[in-house]
Amino acid sequence: MDIVYAIWLRSMKRFIRSRSGIVGSILMPFFVLIFLGVGLNNVVTIPGLGGGDYFLFLIPGMVTMSVMFSAIGSGVQILWDRKFGFLKETLVAPVTRLEIMAGQTAGGATNAVLQGCCLLIPALLLLGLEIQNMAGVAVTLAFMVLIGFGFTAFGIAVASRTGDSAGFQLIMNFVMLPIFGLSGAIFPISSLPSWAVPFTLIDPLTYGVEGMRYGLTGVSQIHPAICIAVIGGFCIASTVAGAFLFRKMK
């Protein structure tokens, strides 16, 4: 476990020192939240949610967006470590690749959850979001952790099969936008046309968004037990795939 902790600690120190990266990753979803919320709050009504307040509907989606984008982006660190030789030094050390991958995943997921919290706290203080009880806080954090671990492992899996950071960014942009766009983060699933519903239901982030929404507002269009089962299964599957591909990386 020492190597897992050491790699996790390295990721945390890098996160703390990268102030511009923290600010940038928080401001983008925050500005999307403000612009969409201000523009559509008086136009869009969400039945059964805080009197139809679109701001309240949008906040869980934007927090999820912050966590997912940060988590997947952690995969690029694998490529930078390989480019500058740190990964080679780690791989030849008397530790298993599984431990290295576990440390990278834990560090990326922790960073992602912290960035999600950095967006959630202003939403609580400035935008009128009210969490009803501590159980809602626990549910919200649980889904943030599962989303963070699942998509960090997914990013590591892709990075393990990608030759350079530019290619990784291109693939991630191609993958992340459909995953986020179909997740119901910015519109209710019930408003989708019938042909789009199956695509939304096979999107793992949909269950993360709805689980977060349940924790923050008490309302969800998918039962929270189903949400945690699906996002938990995705977390396990992506971790197994990431560990397998990382072990095969040369």
Image (cartoon, helix red, strand yellow):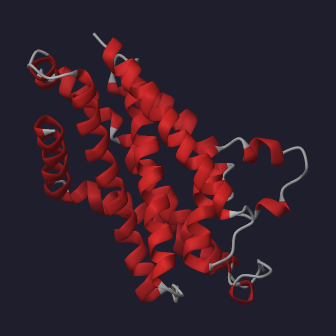
Quadrant for the C terminus, please.
top left
Q: Residue at x 34, y 34 (%)?
A: 75
In the rendered image, residue 242, in percent from the top left (x then y), is placed at 41, 27
Q: Is residue 120 above or below residue 175?
A: below
Q: Residue furthest toward the right?
A: 194
Tell me: 210 left or right of 69.
right
Report how many numbered discs are placed on residues in the image.
0
- Quarter-of-image position of residue 97: top left
Residue 66: percent from left, percent from top: 44, 58
* Left or right of residue 10, residue 45 in this image: right
At x 63%, y 54%, the residue is 207
Q: Quadrant of residue 1?
A: top left
Classify residue 228 by image quadrant. Answer: bottom right
Residue 65 or 150: which is nearer the viewer? 150
Residue 53 to residue 87: above or below: below
Location of residue 83 in the rendering, given as x and y in whole percent from the top left corner: 19, 21
Does residue 94 appear left or right of residue 108 in this picture? left
Q: Residue at x 53, y 47 (%)?
A: 232
Residue 185 visible from this viewpoint: no
Query: Is 109 in front, or is 75?
Result: 109
Residue 41, percent from left and from top: 68, 81
Residue 131 at least partly seen:
yes
Look at the picture and state if 142 lies above or below 53: above
Is 130 placed left or right of 179 in the picture?
left
Q: Residue at x 32, y 33 (%)?
A: 76
